[in-house]
Amino acid sequence: MRDRPSPAYRVALIGILSAEAVALSFLESLIPAVPFLPPGAKLGLSNVVVMFAAVSFGLPSTLAVILVKSLFTLVARGLSAALIGLCGGLFSGLAMFALSRLTLRGGGKNKGAARFGYIGISAVSAVCHNIGQLAAASVSAGTTLFAYLPFLILFGLLFGSVTGTVLGVVLPALRRQTAVFTDKKKNKIKSKVKDQ
Amino acid sequence: MKRKIFSGTDLFLILPLLAAALLAILLPGIKKDGARHAVIVLDGETAADVNLDALTGPERHTFGEVEIEFSPEGARVLASPCPDKICVRTGLLTKNGDTAACVPERIVVKIVTEKNDIDAIAY
């Protein structure tokens, strides 16, 4: 197992992951709006990084990345978008963390293995993101907006599955990146990367 | 911990959500419609209630800085000063439950059908 990380390591890690999340959400904002999508439905590419944090580094790091991402939204898109995004991010971050910690019980050779795949965790987290967004939007609009929820669930499941697949594909690269600046000696990288 | 991109148990997460969403989308469509009203909620309070089926032609009204068009077909947000224009992009609202929200302007347009027995069950 990894040694307990130093504060400097944590700050550096959170900084890199946050920068990646912000860059991804900026890149995604360059894609023109698709007319048939329900309002608030987006691919959510930056959640690839948030989910990597949730799966690999625990809740505090995940929440830190979500907070930095919301600060970027605050600067780029204003207060109401930032609050809605923060609420959605907190809901989905908690869901990612909880689901990623569940393991298979009972006998058999799979005991202790991860219970859910990246697609399952990501799809449910995307839906939780939508629920959080709607809750915040409903509060600030002063009336319930949950009429949107069924449509958001459909697209949340779809886009969540896509981002979950993306995470599964880019995971080796993300691990290599964090391992490079974790280890003083590069020859240790292999043994450290294996344990996740 | 070894984790797959897709595990069979993921279906236990995804399928119930998918079924619930499809049901919630399809069920209100079955319902017979009474007279449709467009309800405007501004700052959390009902600012207007327009019976769309009683209109003869399109009418435009401004609430705060948001311009809304009511017509026998439905209601839509024509213009809003907000940055995202989500409310405008939502387009024409026609069915019971259709909603367009402009959160920055704190205004929501909803289509509500007049209460009947089926309404009471569905909502």
Image (spheres, helix red, strand yellow):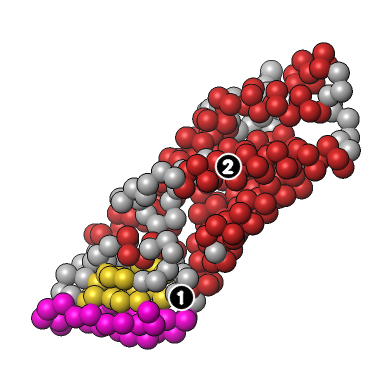
Q: Magenta stretch containing residue A34, yes or no?
A: no
Q: Position of residue A89 (x, y in %)?
A: 60, 52
Query: Which residue has dot 1 on it?
Result: B106
Which stretch did the figure color magenta?
Answer: B37-65
Does residue A140 lie above or below A185 as drawn? below
Badge 2 and badge 1 both on one subunit: no
Identity of the residue drawn at 46% across and 75% down:
B106
Q: Nearer the viewer, residue A130 or A33?
A: A33
Residue A40 in view in this figure: yes
Q: Magenta stretch containing residue B61, yes or no?
A: yes
Crowd band around label 2 with a 10 angstrom C-alpha radius: few (<14), some (14–19), many (20+): some
Query: Looking at the image, do the residues carrying marks 2 and 1 touch, with CB atoms under 8 Å apart?
Result: no
Identity of the residue drawn at 59% across and 59% down:
A75
Q: Is residue A147 left or right of residue A10?
A: left
Does residue A113 lie above or below B32 as drawn? above
Question: What kind of element bears circle 2?
Answer: helix
Q: Quadrant of residue A7?
A: top right
Q: Is residue B13 left or right of residue A34?
A: right
Which circle marks residue A23 in the picture? Answer: 2
Report how far apart the C-alphas of labels 2 and 1 lie in the structure.
30 Å
